[in-house]
Every structure is written in structure tokens, then in C-alpha cells.
Image (spheres, helix red, strand yellow):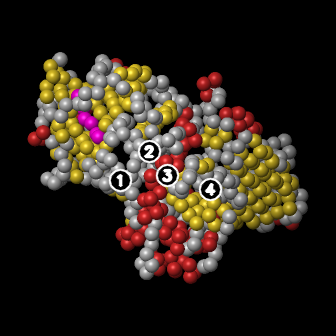
Amino acid sequence: MMMRSFGGSMAAAVLVMPAAAHAADPTPSIRPAPAWVVPVKVPTPNPKLLALPAQVLVLNVQERLAREATTTYLEYVAQPQTVTGLQGIGTVAMPWNVERSDFAIHKIEINRAGKVINALDPAAMMVLRQETNLDKAMLDGGRTVVLPVKGLQLGDRLTVAVSYTTKAPVIAVRPEEVWMVNADETINRTERRLIVPDDLAVKWYRAPATAEPTVTKAGGYTDYFFVGSGAKAREWPTGTPSRFTAPLVQVTAWSNWNEVATAVIPLFAKARTIKDGSPLAAEADRIAAASKDPEQRLLAALRLAQEKVRYVALLLGQGAYVPVGAEETWEQKFGDCKGKTALLLGLLDRLGIEAEPMLVSSSLNSYMPELHPSLAVFDHVMVRARVNGRTLYLDPTSYGQRTVSELSRSAFVRGLPLVPGTDLISIARTIPAQALSQADVVWDGRQGFERRVPFTATLVLRDETASQMRAAKAASEDADKHLENLQNFVPGVANKDLALKSEEPEQPDGSYKVTFAGTATMDWSPIKGLKGYRYELSQNTVKWEFEDGRSGDKDRDLPLVMNWPYYIASSETILLPNGGKGFKAEGEQIDRRFGAVRITRSIGIEGDKAVTRAVFVHEKPEASAEETRSMKKVADELNDKFAYVVAPGKIRPVKDEEGKKD
């Protein structure tokens, strides 16, 4: 699934992409602009943009919806301001997906002191056959239409006008569009026009950050005109949801979500089929023979789909909608989200596990609760399954998932299950049952603190954090950087002192376990005005540097995106000399639930040990504006609540700056 968009940036229009041309490639047509296109008014150069190599005076995108095809007209006017800028815009390069659209060039002109010069030379035009997204593991059948502009000079203005007309896809779709009305501060003026026939029933969504359009009616059509200047965009507080900050517009002729699903259901029904006796059927039989537990079968099928088939987005031809079949995906050992989903569904079918594909959106996740029924809003597909009464969310394009508990959650807010009579659903936002990161440090101070003290540190990563670390380890080419990533999870000990002893990414319970050991000088400090020393226990887990930037009335009602799921826990234990005699714990016990978080900390002397345990949990993915204000206040308060172990007066630890913890 892929959301279509045009004209959000001029980057594609000025990028030269060298490659060999193929004679068999189609060529763009050259013809006048459609009659419905409104002439573009070119503004004067913006004095604030004169330092740029080239100034885009106007970027204008006009789109006309129709039942049979949608045409998008794009025109830009650019002016070189330096020799570098002249080089940059002197070769026009326009992207073209030949499988999914027809492409026409309407004009390439030079305006020199009021004189218009035709710079459209068909003989100089090249269609470059090159996959432009290989770095993103994407095959989209894209071409680049390249045309050098002869005679362009400093002081000239270059006008380029083209259009794309969509081809009918393999499934019955409705006229629809989703796009950002971005006001790029490097572009003098950005314009977006959408023309809708009056006899086409459509629904609209306009995000809060989108300026209201100018609306006119003529000839049976309604014209919606959006405009943005090159002014610097408003700076939003950290963590503001994108649905508030990004100027998005949606228009759709779909009636309801079930209508959207009905168009796609047959594609996956066919693609998930696995024939008896096929190589993929043998894989399913192997999984079934290994365990009768449906949860273990599901996890094994997911692991096969994630790790035995590499991810490559296939958007060639009708690939934006049609999944490659399960058996073909297995045979070629690569597939996109649709093909990998079909493969996983086929395996689950043979294993007797109820499951269906579910459309989701990674790019518009924050907007989904507000959007109207549309196919264009989705750019990803995954699997929703049911095992032992639990609903699970399986993404075969992810990596390293080993537990059912992490599959009971998803980063996606809404999804559209592809089943008859469906509707958009909310996806579970459950809090993990255990800490996703658990770090336990034990200091052996039984021989005193006059020298470097031996310690051990155990790190256990679970669920999402474990799978993310497995994926990072698999992709890492820098062992030192990977080690540093692990060390950063351990509070209270400097990374340079953490010597790796063992790393076990595949524990039987699905966790990722790491152990460290070493020696370090504990930072015992004199107690001001008193005899004796005290050691500051690690504050890392409960400390929260909360900076959200919300101030004034305009930001007062904005919610805050939380890092979710987030559940960390730590403990610090000191084995004390003399059986712990005379040692005391100093500091406040904490057990606070405020806003969208919970923080706890306990400290005490337990026989011959001093022990502190701390937990920090984000209890939901987003905090309201009121909750955000309360969290800021309490976080600042808790940051000053330190905890200590106080030694009896006769103990004389040595403070060593080199051994001081982070």
C-alpha cells in the first residue's frame, strides 16, 4: 500500500540522476495544458530568500478529481541566483511511474527581461530507466524524465509545467486524495488547487494546521485553493502530535470503511493460498510437528516470515495494491508488506490459527481517528490473529519478536481488518506486564571502599526492547557501537568500567540478557557539617528532564506524545562491610502516579545490604494538555529527591574522580 502525493517539494524537480536510457521506454507526450488549469501568477522574488543558490518563486499544483481518472498539473517557476543555482536548475528532472500514470510536458520556458523563449527540445529529452529507491529496498518501476535547458542564464526565470494522469488500478477505487499543504520556507509561494465535480459526493478532512481554502464554483465544479508563503513555519512544542503540526488535507468519495475493505479482500484471499505438497506447505508442517501449542506455532510462523524472507517494497504495475502470492514470495525469498503478509496468513491457515490482513498507516498514524474512509490513507498491511482468546498484531516486516505479550500491542492507533462487514478499529494500547528494560547492579563492598570495588551488572531486555536490540545487532557493522548501546541501559556505572561478560540474545522466555562485571571507585562524599561519608545511589531511572516548551495560550491545550510503550526498572545493591552494622539509608520513598506516568522508588538497609529499586512507566501513548502540565511540575519536584547510603563515622571511603559514575 502506498499513499500517492505530488508537489510537496522541489527536490525531485532539480535532481539529475545519471543512467543509461532504454529505447523501449515510453516517452512523455507534449501538448498544451488542460483547459481547466488556472494560469499561475508569479510573485516577485522574496528578499529573504536571495541568499539561496536558486529561488523557487512559485510551486503550483492543481488537481482535478474524476470518476475515471485524476489529473495532477504541476508548475514551478525558479530563478537562479548564483552559478551554483544555475547548475542546479539548469537540467529539469521529473519523476514518472510509467506503470501507474501517463505523463505530459506542457511547457519549459525561459523568461528573459520579459521575453519568453521556448526551451522545450524533444530531441534533448531522455527517459532514464533507474530504480530511484533501491536504498529504501523499494522497486517502484520509476523513471526519470531529464531535459537539459539550453541557454539558461543568471537573471532568467525558468518555468516548467507538466501533468500526471492516473491509470485505472486493478481494483475498483473511488476518487480520493491525501496530501500535505506544506509551506516550504525555501519556496517563495506554494499553491495547491483541488477541483471537484459537484455531482461527486465527497468527504473532507482538514487538519488544524491547514489554512482555510478559498472556495469558488463554476461550470459544475468546486475549486478549493490553498496557499502558503515562504515564511518560517511555526515552531511547535516538543512532543506535539503531528495531526496538530502538519497541514494535511483529505478528500474522498468512499462511503464507508467496509466499502474500502471490500475492494481489497479478494486480493489477499487469493494470495494467501498454499497448495498441498508445496515447499511452503512443508514449512507449515514442520512448525506444526514441532509444537501443538498455538502460541508457539504462531511465533514460529512469524519468525519464518520475518527472518527467512527479506523485505523489498514491490510497487511495479499493480504492485501498489496486489500482493504477490504466498508461495511465490517464499520461492523468491523476498517480498513487500503485502507479500510477506500473504505468506504469514497462509502459514497460519495451515496451522489452524484464525487471522486476517489489516490495513494500517505509518505516515498518518496520528491522524487516523479523524480521517474519513479512504484507501489512500493506508501505506502498510499486517496481520491480526486470535490465539487462546487473545487478539495479536503481527507485522512480518518487523524483526526479532519472540513473545506473545509484545504482539498484544501495536504502535498503530487504528487499523482496518479485511473481513466482511468491517469498520476501522482501535488497536490495543496495553501496558507491559514486566519492565522492558531491567538493569540490576550489585556492588561487593564487603572488603570496604578504600579501593576500586568489584561489581556485577545484569541487563534484561524484554518484548519490544529485546526485539529492537536483536534487529540493531543484526544490522550493526560496528561492534563497539553495539556494545555502547547495551552499556547505555545500565545506570550508575560509567561505560568505561562495564566489561562485557556474556550476551545472550535468545533466552527461553524471549528476553535478551547481558551481563557485565568490573571494578570502579564508588563516589563516597563527606557529609557537610557532620562526620562520615555518604554514597549517592543512582538517580537515573526516576530522573526525568521534562522539557515540553508549552507556554502561553496558543500551546495551552496541546497534548503530548509519550515514548510508548516505556517501562524501565533498575536496582542497585551494595553488599556492606561488617554485616551492614551502622549503615543507614537516607532519602524519600517514592510512589507517584501523575499525568500519564508512574514512578516508584524504594530504599533501605536489608541486613548486610543497602538496596534501592526504581520503576518508571509511561501508562499511555499520549498525555492530555492538563496531564502534561501536572507531569512537568511533579517531574521537577522528583528530580531533587536524591537517595543515599550513609556510612558509620569510622568508615573512610576514598573518593576517586577517575572512578566517578555517570
**Local crowd size for mark 1, using a 10 Å CA cut-off: few (<14), some (14–19), many (≥20):** some
Residue 409 marker = 4
Which residue bears the numbered disc 3?
261
Which residue bears the numbered disc 2?
376
Residue 361 showing in the rendered view: no
Query: Which of the two discs, 4 and 1, labels the residue nearer the N terminus?
Result: 1
Residue 61 marker = none
Which residue bears the numbered disc 1?
170
Mark 2 residue type: Ala
Q: Give me the residue at 52% from left, 39% from top.
A: 372
Magenta residues span: 159-165
**Local crowd size for mark 2, using a 10 Å CA cut-off: few (<14), some (14–19), many (≥20):** many
Measured from the top left, where is residue 626 in percent x and y? 71, 33
Distance from Cα at disc 4 to Cα at disc 1: 33 Å
Q: Give me the residue at 54% from left, 55% from top.
A: 420
Query: Helix, strand, or loop for circle 2?
Result: loop
Query: Helix, strand, or loop for circle 3?
Result: helix
Q: Give me the residue at 75% from left, 66% from top.
A: 444
Distance from Cα at disc 3 to Cα at disc 4: 23 Å
Q: Nearer the viewer, mark 4 or mark 1?
A: 1
**Local crowd size for mark 3, using a 10 Å CA cut-off: few (<14), some (14–19), many (≥20):** many
Query: Which of the two discs, 3 and 4, labels the residue nearer the N terminus?
Result: 3
**Local crowd size for mark 4, using a 10 Å CA cut-off: few (<14), some (14–19), many (≥20):** many
Residue 545 in the magenta stretch? The answer is: no
